[in-house]
Image (cartoon, rainbow, N blue to C red):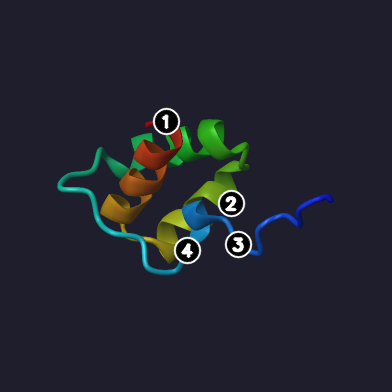
């Protein structure tokens, strides 16, 4: 019997913990673009939604 896909992706949860440190915002935007296949404006919007250290956590989770 097929299994339904999950209703949410834990990478995009609302309460993302903060990493101890984060790289400069320009590096985070560039890495978010490459990692999540985002446009520059989408990656910048992601940085507005999350703190730099939260975005660092999302990137580390993806590559960890």
Q: Are marks 2 and 3 in contact (CB under 8 Å)?
A: no
SS under mark 4: loop
Answer with left or right where residue 31 lies relative to residue 17: right
Q: Which numbered mark, 4 or 2, is in the foreground of this view?
A: 4
Image point (45%, 37%), residue name = 62
| Camera-side residue of 24 and 57 | 57
Identify the residue position indicated by label 4 in the image: 13
SS under mark 2: helix
Answer with left or right where residue 7 lies relative to residue 3: left
Identify the residue position indicated by label 2 in the image: 42
Answer with left or right where residue 43 lies relative to residue 48: right
CA separation in Å, label 3 and label 4: 8 Å
Q: Which numbered mark, 2 or 3, is in the foreground of this view?
A: 3
Image coords of residue 58 (percent x, y): 40, 47
CA separation in Å, label 2 and label 3: 20 Å
In the image, farthest residue toward the front:
1
Q: Are marks 3 and 4 in contact (CB under 8 Å)?
A: yes
SS under mark 3: loop
Identify the residue position indicated by label 3 in the image: 8
Identify the residue position indicated by label 1 in the image: 63
Q: Is residue 20 above or below residue 46?
A: above
SS under mark 1: helix
* Mark sitting earlier along the chain (3/1): 3
> How would you rate the neighbour count of disc 3 (Cα within 10 Å): few for under 14, some for 14-19, many for 20 or more?
few
Image point (27%, 40%), residue name = 24
């Amino acid at each position: 019997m097929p299994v339904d896909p999950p209703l949410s992706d834990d990478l995009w949860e609302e309460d993302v913990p903060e990493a101890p440190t984060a790289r400069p915002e320009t590096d985070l935007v560039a890495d978010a673009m490459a990692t999540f296949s985002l446009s520059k404006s989408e990656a910048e919007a992601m940085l507005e939604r999350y703190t730099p250290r939260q975005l660092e956590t999302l990137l580390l989770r993806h590559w960890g």
